[in-house]
Image (spheres, helix red, strand yellow):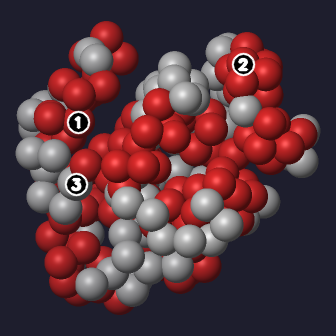
């Protein structure tokens, strides 16, 4: 499902920023789309932490093959050694198990997240081991489809901003944040197109 605001956000970004306009026009046939349920999205984000997209896909494929379904109950029923055999580090095994427990026992108040504001959702998610602000922001973008998330901890976003706006030079984060303010209230959309400028194939979460 592509967000209903996507065409409106694209038009606003193209009008307001010539550089962003060029990037958006380069990718006319693709858009952000929600993929998977909340547990699926968060588990996949944990798998992808600090490894390449290709490596993350390989681990995820093995994890899916080991489970009857990607669900909290299925993860909790699987032996830790089996999770490790999928290519997960011991720490990521702990993280995914903790995530599964939060979903299984109702600590994760999934049904309330769509009505909560971004920072409140982040505050709840970071109570799960292994979920920091970056993972929570990925969830806001890819699952809740929030329009104005600006994940400045993301290395890909920083790289793309340096490439397109600062001639590849390293610049302070504060300067990037100031530039990003120009894209509000559509910073998720701007971020997504900056990612595409580095890798045209969208990451699936």
Q: Residue at x 12, y 58 (%)?
A: 129
Q: Work out whether mark 3 precedes mark 1 in sequence or the reverse, and give the earlier one.
A: 1
The residues tagged by marks 2 and 3 sit, at their Cα atoms, a distance apart of: 32 Å
Under tag 3, what secondary structure?
loop
Indicate whether 147 appears above or below 167: above
Q: Which residue is mark 2?
A: 12
- CB contact under 8 Å: marks 1 and 2: no
Looking at the image, which residue is at 60% across and 79% down? Answer: 54
For discs 1 and 2, the disc positioned in front in the rendered view = 2
Q: Is the N terminus in the top left, top right, bottom left or bottom right quadrant?
A: top right
Cα–Cα span, label 3 and label 1: 9 Å
**Residue 131 image label:** 3
Instruction: Please give the count of numbered marks on the rendered protein.
Output: 3
Q: Is residue 166 above or below residue 148?
A: below
Residue at the far top: name it.
Answer: 115
Mark sitting earlier along the chain (2/3): 2
Q: Is residue 14 left or right of residue 151?
A: right
Is label 2 in a helix, a strand or a loop? Answer: helix
Q: Residue at x 79, y 22 (%)?
A: 15
Q: Nearer the viewer, residue 70 or 184?
A: 184
**Which label number is shown at residue 122?**
1
Name the spot of residue 39 as percent of width and height, x first. Answer: 35, 44
Q: Position of residue 23 (x, y in %)?
A: 80, 47
In the depicted structure, whether residue 67 falls above or below residue 148: below
Q: Secondary structure at mark 1?
A: helix
What is the x, y in percent for residue 173? 36, 55
| Side of 47 where 146 appears, left or right | right
- Residue at the spot x=23%, y=28% of the render? 119
Tell me: 18 left or right of 63. right
Image quadrant where residue 57 sits: bottom right
Determine if residue 139 is in view: no
């Amino acid at each position: 499902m592509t967000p209903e605001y996507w065409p409106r956000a694209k038009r606003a970004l193209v009008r307001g920023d010539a550089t962003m306009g060029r990037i958006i026009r380069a990718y006319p046939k693709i858009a952000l789309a929600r993929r998977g349920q909340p547990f699926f999205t968060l588990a996949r984000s944990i798998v992808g932490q600090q490894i390449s997209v290709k490596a993350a896909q390989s681990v995820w494929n093995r994890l899916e093959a080991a489970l009857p379904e990607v669900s909290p109950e299925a993860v909790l029923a699987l032996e830790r050694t089996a999770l490790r055999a999928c290519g997960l580090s011991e720490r990521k095994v702990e993280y995914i198990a903790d995530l599964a427990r939060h979903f299984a026992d109702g600590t994760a108040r999934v049904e309330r997240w769509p009505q909560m504001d971004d920072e409140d959702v982040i505050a709840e998610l970071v109570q799960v081991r292994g979920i920091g602000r970056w993972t929570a922001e990925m969830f806001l973008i890819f699952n809740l489809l929030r329009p104005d998330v600006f994940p400045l901890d993301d290395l890909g976003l920083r790289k793309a901003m340096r490439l397109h706006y600062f001639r590849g030079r390293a610049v302070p984060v504060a300067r990037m944040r100031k530039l990003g303010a120009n894209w509000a209230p559509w910073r998720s959309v701007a971020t997504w197109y900056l990612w595409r400028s580095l890798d045209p194939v969208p990451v699936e979460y």
